[in-house]
Amino acid sequence: MYLKGGGRLSGRIVSRTGAAVEVDVGAGRIAVPASSVVCVEEGHSPLHEYEDRAGRIGGGDADAWAALGEWADSQGLGTQGREAYHRAPAASPDDPRANAALGNLPGGLAADLGRPITVHAGRPCPGAAAYSLARPARIPALTPV
């Protein structure tokens, strides 16, 4: 759907009246005044594609759920991406892609809660390799104010 002022919405039209068009954009529904709509382009949106792909995945296929999560994120479907990533560990609790996307640290964060830490500004942090999830291994040096 193209809007006056250059905006654009993609999703599933839930209702259309003379006063408004309501669109499910994946993260919720948005009602747009009909007077703000330039045109509606019918087609297969990324949200439709996500639903089609999710419907074809078996519950125990962790790799397919993680791949769908990556695809959904790349399409701007963050809510659906998280949904798919949550299904991957349910099928395979040790799936690295899904756990990284969900922020689950190796070994479990619960084991580290309450443990004292030391900040190593500008130097590698001992033990950081165990928690590296495609993040830099070094903490940036602090700049004096």
Image: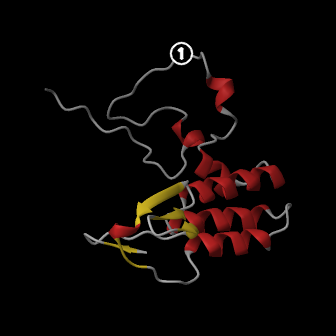
What residue occupies the far left of the structure in this picture? 145
Considering the image in quadrants, where does the N terminus appear? Answer: bottom left
- Mark 1, Cα crowd under 10 Å, few <14 / some 14-19 / many 20+, is few
Q: Residue at x 76, y 50 (%)?
A: 89
- Residue toward you, 107 or 86: 86
Give the left or right position of residue 48, taking residue 61 as reference.
Answer: left
Q: Which residue is drawn at 25% across and 31% down?
A: 142
- Residue toward you, 125 or 76: 76
- Quarter of the image for residue 3 reads bottom left
Give the left or right position of residue 133, taking residue 99 as reference.
Answer: left
- Quarter of the image for residue 68 reads bottom right
Give above or below for 20 relative to 137. below
For the image, the number of numbered tags is 1
- Residue toward you, 68 or 53: 53
- Residue toward you, 2 or 68: 2
Hey, what amino acid is under mark 1?
Answer: Pro
Give above or below for 131 relative to 44. above
What residue occupies the far front of the structure in this picture? 18
Give above or below for 80 relative to 119. below
Q: Position of residue 139 (x, y in %)?
A: 37, 37
Q: Where is residue 25 in the image (x, y as percent from the top left)?
A: 53, 62
- Quarter of the image for residue 129 reads top right
Q: Residue at x 46, y 69 (%)?
A: 18
Q: Where is residue 113 in the image (x, y as percent from the top left)?
A: 61, 21
Give the left or right position of residue 19, taking residue 50 as reference.
Answer: left
Considering the image in quadrants, where does the C terminus appear? Answer: top left
- Scheme of image coloration: secondary structure
Provide the residue designation for mark 1. 116
Q: Where is residue 94 in the image (x, y as percent from the top left)?
A: 76, 49
Secondary structure of the residue carrying numbered label 1: loop
